[in-house]
């Protein structure tokens, strides 16, 4: 074999694997794609959040992929993450069904060069660049207990109807509810949190869990549902059972779904933020992160289109987050203007 041929073969052996590796990590069509995974399908709140995400991504001229599994489990989200890694998306933003269980799949995506963020329901700091938080978690938890105290006129049994037992957003709010009760034990001496029930953000399960609460606690005064699916189910049950005025419902609800129950008195008032804005803010953060302009360090700033400038701050879980703003109170006097907005 001639010396030059030999050298060419050696060169090919060195370069070929490198070229193939490059091809494996490069998108075939050059289109920039950003994905959002919500907890599960059939939740109008999730649809609005994904709509806001798609609006933001498309406004910037990129392609949005919005996905949600049928069931609100980590396993089902992992399958979607695997598919998105194979699709070579530029970023994945996820409303986590579990704080820790998604870590291996999300780390695999990070290793493939995909920017990872969580939004609405956080994944652990090792699995994300930063978290897009809808509102201050401490304020949400404390405000909901204060609302229940107000509705129960200071005394009686209260219960929580949550989403899944693994949902990190609801779990954090519930922790703050308990702290509010513990730290002000004098004020809340006659208010008793009797149960935390889980409706899994599924309508039928939330209805049956509400019925279970009524059966187990005939003297129940207030149901706090820090989930839009749960609060709407509780409003329905209280209305259908003719219990308006006897048992009050409060929590976090979509004005479009809750107007009926705020107007009929089963829910005296409730709170929420704009889910479309949560998605839209996530879109801008995801694109900035995919370009390396946002690394998730506290103190960074980025611009989020029509919502303006945002900064990254330290989060209570040891990671960082971006806060959308303060929640809004919906009550009989303003629900009419909001029910058609979201
Ligand atoms: C449900 C979901 C979501 C939560 C809202 C308040 O739709 O659990 O994660 O943020 O309620």
Image (cartoon, rainbow, N blue to C red):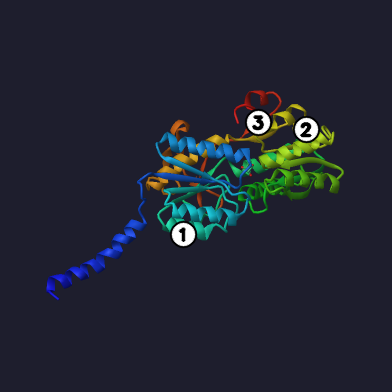
**Disc 1, SS:** helix
Dot 2 and dot 1 residues touching (CB under 8 Å): no
Q: Residue at x 17, y 73 (%)?
A: 6
Badge 2 density bin: few <14, some 14–19, many ≥20, Cα 10 Å:
many
Q: Position of residue 28 (x, y in %)?
A: 36, 50
In which quarter of the view is residue 325 placed?
top right
Query: Pointer 2: what residue?
Result: 266
Mark pair 1, 3: CA separation: 38 Å
Question: In the rendered view of the protein, which quadrant contains the N terminus?
Answer: bottom left
Q: Is mark 2 within 8 Å of ligand 1?
A: no
Q: Which residue is mark 1?
A: 108
Residue 304 seen? no
- The image quarter containing residue 19 is bottom left
Q: Nearer the viewer, mark 3 or mark 2?
A: 3
The quadrant of the rendering that contains the C terminus is: top right
Query: Element under label 3?
Result: helix
């Amino acid at each position: 074999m001639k010396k030059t041929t030999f050298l060419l073969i050696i060169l090919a052996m060195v370069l070929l694997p490198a070229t193939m590796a490059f091809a494996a990590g490069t998108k075939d069509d050059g289109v920039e794609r950003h994905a959002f995974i919500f907890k599960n399908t059939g939740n109008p709140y999730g649809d609005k959040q994904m709509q806001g995400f798609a609006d933001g991504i498309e406004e910037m001229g990129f392609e949005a992929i919005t996905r949600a599994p049928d069931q609100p489990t980590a396993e089902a989200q992992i399958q979607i993450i695997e598919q998105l890694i194979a699709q070579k998306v530029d970023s994945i933003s996820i409303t986590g069904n579990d704080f820790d269980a998604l870590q291996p799949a999300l780390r695999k995506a990070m290793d493939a060069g995909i920017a990872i963020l969580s939004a609405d329901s956080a994944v652990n700091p090792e699995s994300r660049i930063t978290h897009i938080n809808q509102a201050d978690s401490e304020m949400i938890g404390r405000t909901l207990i204060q609302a229940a105290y107000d509705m129960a006129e200071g005394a009686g049994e209260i219960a929580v109807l949550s989403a899944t037992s693994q949902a990190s957003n609801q779990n954090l709010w519930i922790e703050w509810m308990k702290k509010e009760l513990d730290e002000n034990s004098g004020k809340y001496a006659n208010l008793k949190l009797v149960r935390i029930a889980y409706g899994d953000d599924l309508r039928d399960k939330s209805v049956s869990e509400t019925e279970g609460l009524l059966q187990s606690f005939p003297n129940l005064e207030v149901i706090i549902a820090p989930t839009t699916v749960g609060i709407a189910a509780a409003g329905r049950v209280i209305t259908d059972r003719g219990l308006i005025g006897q048992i009050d419902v409060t929590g976090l609800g979509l004005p479009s779904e809750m107007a009926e129950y705020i107007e009929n008195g089963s829910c005296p008032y409730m709170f929420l933020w704009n889910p479309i804005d949560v998605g839209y803010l996530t879109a801008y953060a995801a694109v900035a992160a995919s370009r390396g302009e946002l690394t998730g360090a506290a103190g960074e700033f980025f611009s989020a289109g029509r919502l303006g400038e945002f900064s990254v701050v330290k989060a209570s879980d040891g990671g960082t987050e971006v806060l959308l703003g303060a929640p809004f109170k919906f009550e009989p006097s303003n629900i009419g203007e909001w029910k058609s907005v979201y």
